[in-house]
Image (spheres, coloured by chain):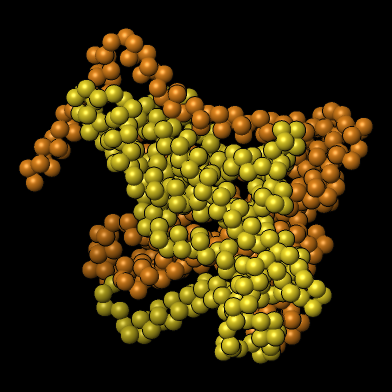
Chain colours: A yellow, B orange
Amino acid sequence: MNQTSTLERIIRGVLIALVLVFFLFPIFWILLMSFQNNDQILRIPPSLFFEPTLQNYLALLTGRLETTAGNLDIAFMRNLGNSLLLSTCSVLLSLALGVPAAYAFARYKFRLGENIAFTLLSFRFAPPLLVLLPLSLFFKHLHLTDTYIGLIWVYQLICLPLILWIVRGYFEDISPDIEHAYRISGHGWWKTFRKIAIPLARPGIAAAGLLAFIFAWNNFIFALILASASKQPVTVGALAFVTASGIQYGQIAAAIVLSVTPTLLLALYAQRYLVEGLSLGAVKG
Amino acid sequence: MALTDSVRSGMTTATPHAQTATRRPGRHRLTRRALPYLLSLPALLVCIGILIPFFTAVYYSMMRFRLNLPMMKGFIWFDNYISFLSDAAFWNTMSISLLYAFVTVTGELILGLGIALLLVRPTRINNAVSIMLLLPLMTAPALAALMWKLMTNPNFGILSYLVGLLGFTDFRWASDPSTALLTVVLVDVWVYTPFIMILLLAGLRSLPKQPFEAAALDGVPRSFVFFRITLPMLMPYIITASLFRLLDSIQQFDIVYSMTQGGPGDTLMVFQVQSYLEFFQYTNVGRSAALLIVLWAITYALSNLFIKHWLKLRERAHGPA
């Protein structure tokens, strides 16, 4: 393996470069587009060199889009705020519900526990619409259609299984003996859980939380079906924006850039944990 | 050193859970018993929350139930399913979903394995490249579809321009029935190949070194090493990664819906898109639910296969439960 020829090294280098171009070029190109005005975008042949403009971002920030056909109000900043609110609240709720349950699954062997764990895991693989379509009818009856609470509740379907399975794996990897020692010295269960178990599993809890945040942010189908226009996150909002704004390509590109930046930054920050998290711990990286 | 040693010996001799429990008085034993149930109560409630709409969907699937014709509502047993058998639209949905899943997973598996092999040596450059490749995977698929839609726009799309240079002057990507599948598959491959790549890379790097060293000493040809040593040892990872992808891919919605909404015509009417339109456009709740139950039956069979296999892997890693 060590004596690789120069030729092989060159071929490997070229192939890696091609891979990078394929996977990074779309992001790079949309980023460029977001700094161009429509004339520059429509120019043939396309050029890498142009005078960058911030007008697309300004239009999104101010919410006023000036077109030849008149002014158009855009609520894209509101979508961005909705995404932030929905994802953050969903993850926090999921952690509050999921970490104690994950602890119970890891530390106590009980029948119900296995059943719950498997029901949740098998629903990770069920078609989301199967649950969402009946829910959309229920939501009307329960008056949840125009609320954040209804969405945050349903987002638990994305976040909770993820948090349960990842955090459970972390609790299982920690020896229970430290907890036993602490308990024998006279501390209650709750104190042991808070002072010993949670701090030890903190990296796992953080990783699961970040990953759940990314998945909640990237989700499209839940909000498409259950969210009213004023509660839509960026994934749904961007599609509506494309339909509404027609040919304002620069603004569309800028909206996409603003929508994907938070998750991409989080992904780079948390990349160490992603392998394990993405496979629900099926592959120990 | 001494400290870690004492901790380690402490770990092996510490009293097991059950014994400490029996030493406590009765009231504690009762709370102890109830504790795991109390802790998992929220998860249980969420489970019930999912199961209720699920059973409702099963019920709807056996009804004549159209939102625009509430008077016609009635229980019709399996008529919705039976009508599928002679319904060309249903078989179109079935075949396009299976084709989509097969093409994407095969493409992603080959490409992902190739990239993982390229990056297997943990040099600084290779690690940086594998981190960069996470970016498409962390892009929301619905937004990724919009990005590709901008790049394949017939007026200014960079990709339309590039294939134009190659001589395909009227290449219409997702709006042409003959290339629509190719276009959405391309987006799917762009988003999800990194998933297979990072799983297989983790697998490749965790393989034991000795068989490879022995083969190198004996001067065994590299194609032989790959097919007889690398591939068989990597198989558990390959199966896990492709089953994971297969289950998601057969249910693809985000990319297809954002890109073409199932069109042009019915070229890309995969299961979830078809049942979405059935529900919201034709307001036929019964048919929509029945379609989803068929999809669920397919994924259930596949996911059972997956969970069984996965438990085996887990057992190997943690010891029997």
Q: Quadrant of the C terminus of chain A?
A: bottom left
Q: What x and y, as percent, mark residue B164?
A: 69, 86
Residue A55 seen in the figure: yes
- Residue drawn at the location 77% of the way across and 35% of the way down: B61
| Residue found at the far left of this picture | B2
A227 in relation to A48, above or below: above
- Residue drawn at the location 78% of the way across and 54% of the way down: B92
Depth check: give the residue in front, B193 or A237: A237
Can you tell which quarter of the image residue A271 is in? bottom left
Judged left or right of residue B120, residue B241 is: right
Depth check: give the residue in front, A35 or B171: A35
Residue B183 seen in the figure: no
Judged left or right of residue A165, residue A224 is: right
Can you tell which quarter of the image residue B106 is in? bottom right
- Please state the total of marks drawn on the protein image: 0
B178 in relation to A131, above or below: below
Q: What x and y, as percent, mark residue B22?
A: 27, 14
Q: What x and y, as percent, mark residue A227?
A: 69, 47
Q: What x and y, as percent, mark residue B279?
A: 79, 45
Q: Quadrant of the N terminus of chain A?
A: bottom left
Can you tell which quarter of the image residue B157 is in? bottom right
- Residue drawn at the location 47% of the way across and 51% of the way down: A211
Judged left or right of residue A24, residue A244 is: right
Depth check: give the residue in front, A218 or B310: A218
- Residue drawn at the location 66% of the way across and 71% of the way down: A59
